[in-house]
Image (cartoon, rainbow, N blue to C red):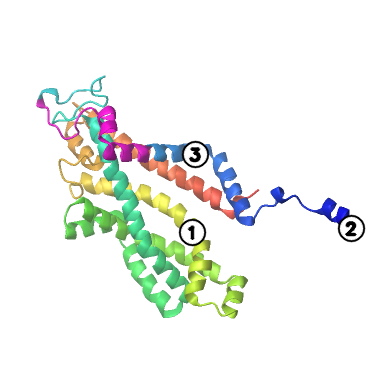
Amino acid sequence: MSLHAESTAVPREKVESPRVKSIKDFFRRFTKNKPAVIGFFVILFLVFLAITVSSFSRFDIIITPHDPSTVNLVDRFQGPSSEYWFGTDHMGRDIFSRIVHGMILTLGIGFVSVIMGGIIGVPLGIIAGFYGGKIDAIIMRFVDVLLAFPGILLALAIVSILGGSLINVTIAVAIYSVPGFARIVRGSTLATKKLEYIDAIRALGATDTRIIFLHVLPNVLSPIIVNATLYIATAILTAAGLSFLGLGAQPPAPEWGAMLNDGRNHLRDAGHIAFFPGLAILVVVLAFNIFGDGLRDALDPKMKN
């Protein structure tokens, strides 16, 4: 009897929980997407570089030996060289140092604005989708009003009212991202609340708060994460556009959009002033978009083999 039980027993190490299996499936699908993996490592490197330069002065001196704000009129309009890797601008400031130091501003605006937009948009979407009726109608009409304006024009109007500064740009981009979060989360919530196990949990006496936090929110995390990644790229591009127009970071802050604005008057005689900040924006936005696409494909249940 005992021998039979031992022979039919499943080895403990081969038993995997559904959560562990789903995580492994996610990593397997994600690592198959080579561009997404490259985008992830590019983002990881840039974030590490920005934090290192802004937090540790010893590494700052090694990576950027030239001060990003020091004016040196003798060396103005210098092209890329061994001393100035990306050349100098019209004030003689090292462009490479300014791009590296401006990275913390650019990434900070992207991350903070999307987090702020998610904090507002996600609860609105869950409440609208879960309760429906008049609550849904009121919330979604508010969202529709925000969506009626093109994103850059909405951010431009908000910054024009609040005034030009990094904080106001962050607030404007955050408000611009609220409708996207609300609509996506509402759609996922509508699909989730129709599942049979939600009705079973409600029949057992679970409160709405418990159902939302323990069952609805975990099911809508995937689209939140994917779209947050994509919104960061949009936020960076929007913030750079506002700074280019003079409504974002103010001189001498080394923000990439403001650096583009500095170089637009010297495109013919010193094109490198605008080229390298534009290239930095391109690399960061492309990395976030590719990474976001890879996350979407890896988290999509239809992509399972």
**Residue 185 percent coordinates (x, y):** 45, 64
State yes or no: discs 2 and 1 in contact (Cβ < 8 Å). no
Indicate the amino acid at tag 3: Val
The quarter of the rendered structure image containing the N terminus is bottom right
Identify the element where label 3 is drawn. helix
Of callouts 2 and 1, the N-terminal one: 2
Tag of residue 1: 2
Write the residue at 37% across / 49% down. Answer: 232
* Residue linked to disc 1: 221
- The location of residue 257, given as percent across then percent down, is 24, 42
The amino acid beneath tag 2 is Met
The amino acid on which the numbered mark 1 sits, given as a three-letter code, is Leu
Q: Residue at x 29, y 42 (%)?
A: 104
Assess disc 3: are there few (<14), some (14-19) or many (≥20) residues with their C-alpha within 10 Å of its C-alpha.
Answer: some
Residue projecting furthest to the top: 82
Q: Which residues are magenta?
A: 46-73
Near-viewer residue (16 or 274) = 16
**178 and 137: which is toward the camera:** 178
| Foreground: disc 3 or disc 2 | 2
Residue drawn 51% across the image and 62% down it: 218
Label 3 vs 2, first from the N-terminus: 2
Residue 183 is situated, as x and y percent measured from the top left of the image, at 43, 64
Q: Which mark is residue 37?
A: 3
Magenta region includes residue 52: yes
- Does 208 appear above or below 219? below
C-alpha span from label 2 to label 1 = 48 Å
